[in-house]
Image (cartoon, rainbow, N blue to C red):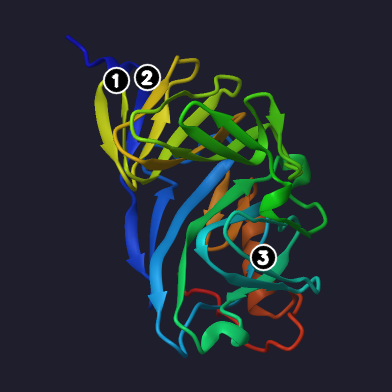
């Protein structure tokens, strides 16, 4: 007899972790058996991390093409700077949406003003693949404070719509293709029917534990759901999950380092451009991450 949960869950992804020096990143997507969910092509859990006075996050300037980065924090702060001239601190509940398009350079650091104090950091950074017709679009940066995002309240469930459309709400964050992305806080015993208006869907457990059709899953797991399946999530304890997905991307994407493209030749060009210094520069920051050897 088949497990009923197997009928609605296509994959259970347990991420690979790596230490970036001071904090751990758990890479959920891409996964060997599932590269994307809707337009989401990368999905990283950053932290939890604690930094003693004098230390912090120092991700030096680096390039991107063909994607949009979506940064969302649960705790702490990150200062974004880019070669377009934007400087923006992102704090819990805010959304930083950075469209790389034909090319952008950015850094992520702890501000000097708070580096002398004890600081923390915990959040999600995801990459969204741009449609083929927008891969070479103009780069851009868009910040949306938490107070501008729709809040959805149900029985024992509080949701913030980060991007896209879901549960009869639309986020002010402009997306490149149909998608949804939600931060969901659930009381113990609360249940939530996962929106079925998008073809590809997943549930990522940030904290706590949930059950789907009687099968329990705990924090730092992603459940990729079957298309069209009727799925209800039940919180076994106070829990926080992310709901995400959207329309399938329009064809294969190649990924190399920070570059995403439908064309291998375009990635080779981006590699050469970064190596030869043809990307833009961030004012006042001469550091950079060198092109990897492999």
Rounded to the nearest angstrom, the CA distance separating label 2 from label 3 is 40 Å
Residue 109 as seen in the image, left or right of residue 282: left
Question: Which-is-in-front pick, marks 2 and 3?
Answer: 2
Q: Position of residue 68 (x, y in %)?
A: 66, 52
Q: Are marks 2 and 3 in contact (CB under 8 Å)?
A: no
Task: Label 1, secondary structure: give it.
Answer: helix
Relative to 285, is 65 above or below? above
Q: Position of residue 138 (x, y in %)?
A: 83, 56
Residue receiving disc 3: 270
Residue receiving disc 1: 5
Disc 2: CA contacts within 10 A as few (<14), some (14-19) or many (>=20) = many
Residue 223 as seen in the image, left or right of residue 194: left
Question: Which-is-in-front pick, marks 1 and 3?
Answer: 1
Relative to 242, is 288 above or below? below
Task: Label 2, secondary structure: give it.
Answer: loop
**Residue lying at 35% horizontally and 41% vertically, measured from the top left:** 238
Whether residue 20 is visible to the viewer of this picture, yes or no, is no
Rounded to the nearest angstrom, the CA distance separating label 1 from label 3 is 43 Å
**Residue lying at 43% horizontally and 35% vertically, measured from the top left:** 203
Residue receiving disc 2: 8
**Residue lying at 53% horizontally and 45% vertically, measured from the top left:** 41
Question: Considering only order in the chain, which callout, 3 or 1, is on the residue closer to the N terminus?
Answer: 1
Q: Position of residue 74 (x, y in %)?
A: 50, 57
Q: Are marks 1 and 2 in contact (CB under 8 Å)?
A: yes
User: In the image, which disc is placed on residue 114?
Assistant: none
Q: Quadrant of residue 12?
A: top left
Whether residue 36 is visible to the viewer of this picture, yes or no, is yes
Name the image quarter holding the C terminus: bottom left
């Amino acid at each position: 007899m088949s497990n009923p949960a197997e009928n609605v869950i296509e994959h259970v992804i347990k991420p690979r972790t790596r230490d970036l020096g001071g904090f751990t990143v758990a890479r959920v997507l891409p996964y060997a058996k599932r590269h994307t969910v809707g337009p989401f092509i990368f999905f990283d859990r950053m932290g939890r991390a604690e930094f003693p006075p004098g230390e912090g996050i120092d991700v030096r300037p680096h390039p991107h093409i063909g994607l949009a980065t979506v940064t969302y924090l649960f705790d702490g702060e990150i200062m974004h700077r880019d070669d377009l001239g934007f400087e923006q601190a992102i704090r819990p509940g805010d959304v930083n949406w950075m469209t790389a398009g034909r090319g952008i350079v950015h850094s992520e650091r702890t501000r000097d003003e708070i580096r002398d104090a004890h600081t923390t950091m915990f959040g999600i950074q995801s990459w969204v693949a741009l449609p083929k017709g927008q891969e070479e679009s103009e780069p851009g940066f868009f910040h949306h404070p938490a107070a501008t995002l729709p809040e959805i309240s149900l029985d024992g469930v509080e949701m913030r719509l980060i991007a896209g459309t879901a549960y009869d709400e639309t986020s002010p964050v402009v997306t490149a293709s149909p998608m949804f992305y939600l931060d969901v806080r659930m009381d113990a015993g609360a249940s939530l029917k996962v929106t079925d208006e998008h073809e590809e869907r997943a549930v990522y457990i940030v904290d706590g534990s949930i059950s789907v059709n009687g099968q329990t899953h705990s924090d730092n797991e992603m459940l990729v759901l079957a298309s069209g399946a009727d799925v209800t999530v039940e919180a076994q304890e106070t829990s926080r999950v992310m709901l995400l997905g959207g329309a399938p991307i329009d064809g294969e994407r190649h990924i190399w380092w920070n570059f995403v493209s439908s064309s291998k030749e375009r990635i080779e060009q981006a590699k050469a451009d970064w190596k030869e210094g043809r990307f833009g520069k961030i004012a006042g920051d001469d550091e950079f991450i060198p092109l990897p050897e492999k």
